[in-house]
Amino acid sequence: MSLSPYSRTEHLRAVWPWLPLWAVVALLAIFSHGPMPLYSTRTLAVAWEMWNQGHWLVPHINGQPYSEKAPLLFWLIQGGWFVFGVGDVWPRVLEVLIGGAQLVLISMLARRLFPSRPWMAKAAPWMLLAFGYAFLFGLQIMYDVLLALWALAALLCLTPKVQRPEPRWLLFGVCVGLGLLTKGPVMLLHVIFPWLLGPLWNDWAARHRARWYGGGVLALLLSGAMLLAWALPAGFSGGEAYRQRLFFTQTAGRVVDKLAQGKDLQNHAEPIWFYLLWLPLLLFPFSGWPRVWVAIASLRRPLEPGLRFALCWLVPGFIVFSLISGKQLYYPLPEFAGMALLMAGAIAVLRERRPTLATNGWLGTWPLGVGGIVFAAALLALPLLVAGHYLNGEWPESAAPYSRYFAVVFLLLGGLLLIRGRGEMRRLAVAGLIGVLALNTLFTLTLWSRWDLRPAAHLLGAAEQANRPIAYLGNYEGQFHFEGRLTRPIEELFGDQALQDYAHAHPDGLIVAHPGKLEPNDLRYALLVQPFRSSWLVVWPAASLADLRAGHTPPEPSQPTLVYPVDDLRYRMRP
């Protein structure tokens, strides 16, 4: 049955204005610069190779099966390419759509978990969209953003509705299965604890434990069957090495560091206190809002179901993620939604039980307001400090021409956060979102040239069109394949002897080097030089680089070295 006009209006009002505001800001941010190496470029490289070579079942990168990730995100990218054509616009729009869907899901989750608190359905998405790190990482074409969507959808299936308190087990299994097809077994860590601890927060689960756990087991079996429906044929199609990594060593290597040693696995081992150390950054700007921490510290039993749900999700999840050897700041990305629920719920309880603390000015957003004004003052002073040679370096010199414009933005945001009274949380969310957009724009204007690999990728693409073979000194991570539309693998070279052998076998070939600093010969004999992060990328004729490494003088090139950025003379200076 179609929705009545009144119902449609109510649905639109429910997402106003946080969803359109977030969508506009996200689109501005994600299209302010190109895909970020190496996160987004690696994902696009895999999707491109699957598309170009027809590898629909087994993801590939640089000519080899790619066992690091399951294929769902690649399939979604290729589905858009089938409709709109190959490009980087659709993958970025897809990430914005996924992010917007997460905000809608957290609003629905809050409405079900806090049925007596309508404010929560609006507060939770405002808080989620304000997390600075989650917003910036959500701009990457990465699997964790899609994983967070399926985790929220799966948890929504566990929550009770007024008409039906029993979970939707079939949908729960399907959502978990889609998460498994996005990033593999790690999906279970994001949803397993709210299910295992269901009787602690769900009254229906407490009364019907057998049906709760029985239905959950059957749903998880369904999700496992969905994963195996892809993994089994993919494992046999990809070969023995791919099958071994896919089924055994890949996930285990992330959990236990020793299992990854000597197996060329992406482990990212970090100490147990890694997430605790970075928690203030991950939770910014709320880490600088005293009221929310007073609210959480003031929580007392009995807690309402929504708060118990958030704690059952966050506490065991945080412990397990800390114990796992492999750690990255974006691994707990789905848990940001749980943190938003906990913080919003705590604020709601504080307003009800301790109204004096809920309105105390000293617990407001003034620390963040003062911080914003101090940062604005620093940006205002930056051109004077650079002109007086009190500050040197690439970032201060690049930011100085723009810093005063952005100082005005942060001065206004700081003033906004000094305002007291109703709407404090919404002002904080808006200031956080606009502040992150401003920082992303400042990065684009000042430092993006050090991440922009288009010059090198386009040169390599033209070289491949001319049938010139290409090699890379060290580990190659697919950063040139999509932008250069490369269709053949880039050979990896390790050691001087491998370089000499390659140059002897391919005298017309190209070699990409990644030196920490430039030498005079780089600017004399190389084809292209460009900055990359804190180091450099240099594209060489293979014969010239081999001659230099052997102590010989190569012939003078017919054309001068291309130096990027072309309008920045600093990169033309000899070290």
Image (spheres, rainbow, N blue to C red):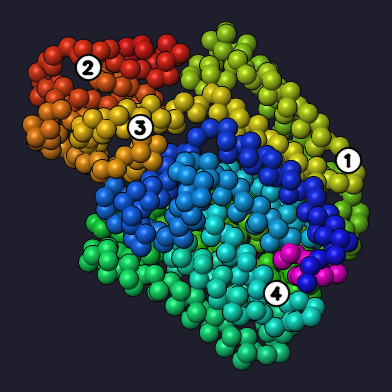
Q: Is residue 34 visible?
A: yes
The residue drawn where x is 90% and y is 46% is: 422
User: Disc 2 marks which residue?
Assistant: 525
Please identify the quadrant where the C terminus is shown: top left
Is disc 4 surrounded by few (<14), some (14 to 19) or many (20+) residues within 10 Å? many
Is disc 2 surrounded by few (<14), some (14 to 19) or many (20+) residues within 10 Å? many
The residue drawn where x is 50% and y is 79% is: 222
Task: Name which of mark 3 and mark 2 comes first in the sequence.
Answer: 3
Residue 27 locus on image (x, y percent): 63, 40
Examine the rendered structure and indicate whether residue 13 appears above or below residue 140. Answer: below
Front residue of 478 and 245: 478
Q: Mark 1 belongs to which amino acid?
A: Arg
Q: Is residue 563 left or right of residue 402?
A: left
Q: How far apart are marks 1 and 3 (CA)?
A: 51 Å
Residue 13 locus on image (x, y percent): 83, 54
Q: Mark 3 belongs to which amino acid?
A: Ala
Q: How far apart are marks 1 and 4 (CA)?
A: 36 Å
User: Disc 3 marks which residue?
Assistant: 457
User: Disc 1 marks which residue?
Assistant: 420
Residue range of the region highlighted in magenta in the rendering: 108-118
Q: How far apart are marks 4 and 3 (CA)?
A: 48 Å
Nearest to viewer (mark 1 / mark 3)? 3
Nearest to viewer (mark 1 / mark 2)? 2
| Mark 4 residue element | loop
Task: Name which of mark 1 and mark 4 comes first in the sequence.
Answer: 4
User: Disc 4 marks which residue?
Assistant: 159
| Mark 2 residue element | helix
Residue 475 locus on image (x, y percent): 28, 43
Nearest to viewer (mark 1 / mark 4)? 4
